[in-house]
Image (tube, rainbow, N blue to C red):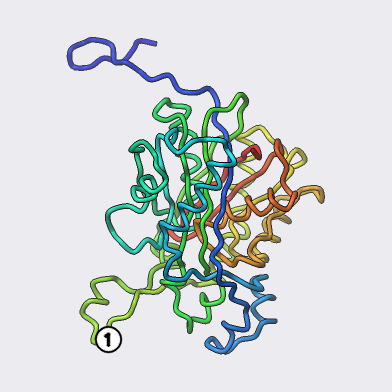
Amino acid sequence: MTAPTGTTGRPLLTEQGETYAGILGIGAYRPKRLVPNAEIVDAIDSSDEWIQQRSGIKTRRFADDSETVVAMSVAASRDALAAAGVDPRQVDCVILATVSHLLQTPSAATAVAHELGTDQAAAFDISAACAGFCHAVALGADLVRGGSARHVLVIGVERLSDITSPTDRGTAFIFADGAGAAVIGPSDTPAIGPVVWGSDGEPKQYDLIRQREDWRDVLVADEPVMPHLTMQGNEVFRWASFSMAKVALQALDRAGVTVDELDCFVPHQANNRITDAMARAMKLPPHVRIARDIVDSGNTSAASIPLALERMIRDGEAKSGDVALLIAFGAGLSYAAQVVTIP
């Protein structure tokens, strides 16, 4: 193939990246405050039994004033870097997925990169809601393989308690806070499969999970309040339970992995009933271990995949070399899935 040329007609130099990329280490941060269902039920006229039947959630974590998006990200990232044996100065890029960093600019990633002591790494935030971490993994792997970076730190972090109404019966018991991180770098073997991702922004779908108020409407209100998340749970359940199983199978197919060769299934921790429906639709064999971090952590949006993965590794449910399928889905409606090897 003829090399691309610039305006002078000379061949353009191209960077040679790594043949393969993989996750080298995982880290997590869970806020100190544990919030049982008993603290939620009165404000939404509900019960512990109803919440568990509806979602599987028993407890969740809410961040305090010191546990900011940046602080939680730094803590999770330090764990991930230590697990990977990578010095912060070796990080070339930081990608942070979140919808709850309440500054439009600058990005939280730039502050995280500085706090960690990187050597002025490239840093930016992405907004893909609950699918954000899987998007960031795909971007990080492509940067390593393309030669733009050797080590990429990807983070999923949320303080959803800031933007969740405690009286909204559809969301108050679901959303929570936390951070997870992964270091992506060179691998001797294929360890991050091709991503299967997409979105459905058709107006009806776009409105299923969204920020309820426009910031401009808040500013002109007689009594300004923080904009809150709203969700049409039944419609989201139907969409995710069946549409995402097809995406998951596509990710397995693109990675050349069968369901029988899968060791771990790590879906977005949205709802245990959605997870069960996906597992049935995919016909997962009994030996496949399924992440259930939602029971103790709630739905932490972009943080849910790395938090669930870190728990599986810590508890011995996921072992080094295991083949895991990651899939996440959320507002947008956005989604992403890929097969990875456990570091």
Residue 162, given in percent of the width and then of the height, sits at: 42, 72
Q: Is residue 45 above or below residue 119?
A: below
Q: Is residue 342 visible?
A: yes
Q: Is residue 194 above or below residue 331?
A: above
Q: Amino acid at mark 1?
A: Glu
Q: Is residue 229 visible?
A: no
Residue 53, given in percent of the width and then of the height, sits at: 69, 76
Residue at point 46% right, 68% down?
160
Q: Nearer the viewer, residue 328 or 42?
A: 42
In this figure, which residue is indicated by the disc labeled 1?
Answer: 223
Q: Residue 321 occupies which quadrant of the picture? A: top right
The kind of secondary structure element at disc 1 is: loop
Q: Residue 193 occupies which quadrant of the picture? A: top right
Residue 291, given in percent of the width and then of the height, sits at: 68, 55
Q: Is residue 87 above or below residue 330?
A: above
Residue 261, given in percent of the width and then of the height, sits at: 75, 38
Q: Nearer the viewer, residue 30 or 246?
A: 30
* Residue 192 shown left or right of residue 128 in the figure: right
Residue at point 65% right, 75% down?
54
Q: Residue 322 occupies which quadrant of the picture? A: top right
Residue at point 46% right, 37% down?
152
Q: Quadrant of the N terminus?
A: top left
Q: Residue furthest left?
A: 8
* Residue 186 shown left or right of residue 315 in the figure: left
* Residue 40 shown left or right of residue 5 in the figure: right
